Image (spheres, rainbow, N blue to C red):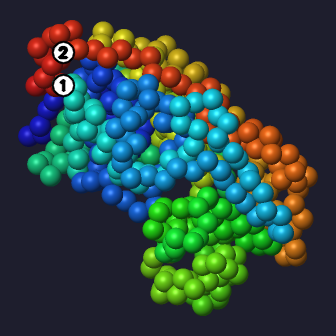
Amino acid sequence: MPEGISVQCCIAGGGPAGMMLGLLLARAGVSVLVLEKHSDFIRDFRGDTLHPSTLKIMHELGVLERFLQLPHQKVTRINARFGDLEFTVADFSHLPTQCPYVAFMPQWDFLNFLVEVGSQHPTFQVRMSAEVTDLIEDGGSVVGLCAETPNGPLEVRTALVVGADGRHSIVRKRAGLSVEEFGAPMDVLWFRLSRKAEDPVDPMGQFDAGRIFIMLNRGDYWQCGFVIAKGSLGEIRATGLALFRESVAKLVPFAADRVHELHDWEPIKLLTVQVDRLRQWYRPGLLCIGDAAHAMSPVGGVGINLAIQDAVATANLLWQPLRGGRVTETDLAKVQARRAWPTEVTQRAQLIVQNRVIRHVLNRKVRLTPPYALRLLARFPFLRRIPARMIGLGVRPEHVQTPLCTQAYLSPERRSGTLAL
């Protein structure tokens, strides 16, 4: 017989959106259960760029100083080379915020930190190795979900199911929510190269005819992204690994002595790029946020930070209805109304870059000529503040409005975090 528990909110997916939402709701006295299908958070090639908007949230939670004691790299500028033109794309140092920089931190460290902070609240629970398999419905409303755990089946009854389980969300699939696809002209080959002390420090983007190469400083290694035309991996592999290594060496001559570290194709992972958005993010008893509601392009590295903004807005709008034990469709519609516009604006900007810059570069066979907008960035440093603000703070940044609820405000049942069925 399945194990049965009841909470006020059950979150499918222990990524940045799910963990941040769980922490914020538990902080406000809502009983929360986060289900994560993996046994830990360690995964290669998870996004780990924490923008000033996210660092601001950590400050508002009162944990920023402790958080920044974790190993990370601070980046105040993003540089690029387009053809023969070298320039700074974004300068974060002028942003009006506590942390005017991007922090590069392994996502598993970030998530473990959120779990640690969340666990200080009595109504916060996380279950690892708990894979959501289906929804429980009653009269057209979602009233819970089913999951498989190492100890057997689990049934969770709840006032609200939140799908924060990524772009391949089982929650949104089972809910039958309609997705609008926008497409992408590229995919990314993701791999590592060792880094030397004399190497550059800032992230770099190299744009050359038919090739785009990204390097992110991870301390003792470079996280590298080789952007390729969508569907072209087979052709690239057919030309051979030696030619691929040669292409990397030409794009980044200072690392030419390290391309031999790519000894075969195994450490070179394909990241499939997709951009989509749910037409409606909710059903009675269910809400999707983060990548489950809108898969973002890697352009700007904003996906994690946008997902966290979703979580903050969701907590701000729903903690009171959840404490009252009933969340209406009107409540859920307010979340989408709050977050749909910044999502659409951000995706629109990403699609412009994808279709007008990246597609053009990948299809180019002869020497690149920098567009006028990039020449302006190179000539007038103050213009670099515009992309810095778009990337670093985003559109309609959210702020923590949920209260810090002490245990004294909770009933004995809520203090336990769950109710037995």
Q: Quadrant of the C terminus?
A: top left
Circles 1, 2 touching at the beta carbon (< 8 Å): yes
User: Which residue extends farthest front?
Assistant: 198
Q: Is residue 25 left or right of residue 207?
A: left
Of helix, strand and loop, which one carries label 1? loop
Which residue type does callout 1 highlight? Pro
Q: What residue is drawn where x is 57% and y is 86%? A: 257
Image-quadrant location for residue 391: top right
In the image, 41 versus 135, the foreground residue is 41
Q: What residue is drawn where x is 33% and y is 58%? A: 42
Identify the residue position indicated by label 2 in the image.
407
In the image, 10 versus 225, the foreground residue is 225
Q: Is residue 230 visible?
A: no
Q: Is residue 356 visible?
A: yes
Residue 233 picture location, percent across and down: 61, 75
Of helix, strand and loop, which one carries label 2? helix
Residue 127 picture location, percent across and down: 21, 42
Which residue type does callout 2 highlight? Gln
Residue 282 picture location, percent across and down: 47, 27
Q: What residue is drawn where x is 79% and y is 62%? A: 86
Give the mark count. Answer: 2
- Residue 122 — which label? 1
Q: Earlier in the sequence, mark 1 or mark 2?
A: 1
Image-quadrant location for residue 101: top right
Distance of mark 1 from mark 2, alpha carbons? 7 Å
Residue 416 picture location, percent across and down: 13, 23
